[in-house]
Image (cartoon, rainbow, N blue to C red):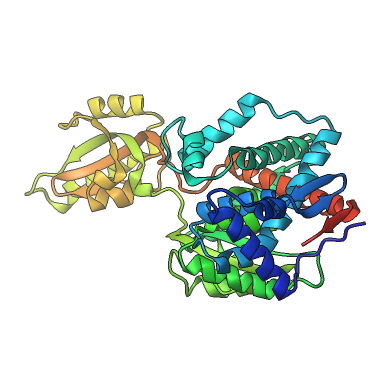
Amino acid sequence: MSSIKLHFPVLLRVGLALCILTIWTAGTPHRADAQNALRIAAIVNDDVITVRDLDARVRMVVLSSNLPRNQQTYQRVWPQVLRGLIDEQLKLQEAERLSIEVTDDDLNRAKRSMEQRNKMQPGSFDRQLEKEGIPLETVIRQIRADIAWAKLVRRRFQSTVEVTIDEIDDALDRLERNKGAPQYRLREIVIDSDDPAADEEEIAKRLVQQLRSGAQFDAIAREFSQGATAATGGDIGWTTKEQLTPEVAELVDRMQPGDISDPIKTIFGYQIIQLSDRQILSGPDPLKSEVTLKQVFLPVPPDAGADAESSQKSIATAVSETAQSCDDMDVLASELNSPAGTDLGTLKIGELSQQLQEAVAGLNEGELTKPIRLPSGFSTIMVCKKVEPESDLPGREEIAERLRAIKFETFAQRYLRDIRRDAFIDTRI
């Protein structure tokens, strides 16, 4: 049975923060410092997490999150860091129990990905850690746990996670309904402790303070969020107001890109939101459609009377009702002795005159305009070929992948919660 304790008395918290600070800043640790470093921070089933393990991870979190390196920061973050280390140990234990292997190639790919994400030179990962005084093993341990857990979750729930056609259609329908409405790119941090003594609101307030002081949101989310999006730095992706809770939907309209919300109370705990970007959701721009056009032009001389104009218009109308293909347009133009060439070329609808834009924009391939009155006569135009521009709406496969990822993460969170509930966890600090 779990005995997690993540809400610590103030004196204990200050004491551990000073212990960590001493270990961190000392060039050569004294005997007492070394003994402190080997103290047990927590026991997770049959494994031990030492103060040294906790110190190394706190150091990594502070540096990667751009947090200030001082006693106050250590005091604030180490309870959440210890919670992360405990969860990490549980993931590794479960992966080992089920014979999940993490290869050297897996680790190297993850390191390369971290280099790219942090705009580091290829191959500089290990050197950068050494420069910052962070033990390589603490980062490798975290990477190994993340990879093993991802493999484990995918293997366990592969047959369970299914995205139906109806779910994809519903998502597309929502996007279509919201075309022209604002769309928001959001990140989140979810604070949801299963320790009834933990002050979730106070934890959330402290994280907001650090974030507004310059801490990196994605790094904080990866370490502290208990939400399904933690692995992606809290990235929810692009979303519309109808997909948000009323509390969040009301907030995002008043936020500017980069803003951090105050803690938002939810049924699960507290949520912190960052607005990364805002855009208008739209479908393809019809003026960017590329069309290949042919015409049959019938001239009307400037001095022609009403009867002559009416006759030419009638013939142009007959063309629009008769032609079935672009080849027909060539034949009809020849039979009617049209003085203008039939081929108008290939161009974007937005490059046409306003009059022709209005006549052509709504047509599909093989369809004809009604006779268009031009200064020198009537023109009937057929769309021979039409290429629609790319939409900024996601495609079906992209939507399916996103829904699938959300389901995997949701199952993963429940799975970890069950493992944590059944584990023996004893915190000693």
**Viewer-side residue, 340 vs 261:** 261
Point out residue 382 in the picture as x, y percentages from the top left corner: 34, 36
**Residue at 52% over, 51% down:** 64
Taking the spot 70% from the left edge, 40% from the top edge, the residue there is 145
Q: Where does residue 211 sit, x and y in percent of width and height?
A: 51, 65
Q: In x, y percent, where is residue 191?
A: 68, 65
| Quadrant of the snapshot with the N terminus | bottom right
**Which image quadrant: the C terminus?**
bottom right
Q: Is residue 159 visible?
A: no
* 240 sits left or right of 167 in the view: left
Q: Residue furthest right?
A: 1
Q: What is the quadrant of residue 3 in the picture?
A: bottom right
Nearer-the-camera pick, 168 or 313: 168
Residue nearest the viewer, comparing 406 with 284 = 406
Extreme left residue here?
A: 303
On screen, residue 96 above or below 56: above
Does residue 185 appear in the picture of this structure?
yes
Which residue is at 73% across, 43% downward?
Answer: 164
Query: x, y percentage for residue 111?
Result: 55, 34
Q: Quadrant of residue 96?
A: top right
In this orientation, which residue lies closer to the viewer: 33 or 405?
Answer: 33
Q: Which residue sits at x=47%, y=64%?
A: 182
Q: Position of 89 compared to 64: left or right?
A: right
Quarter residue 341 falls in: top left
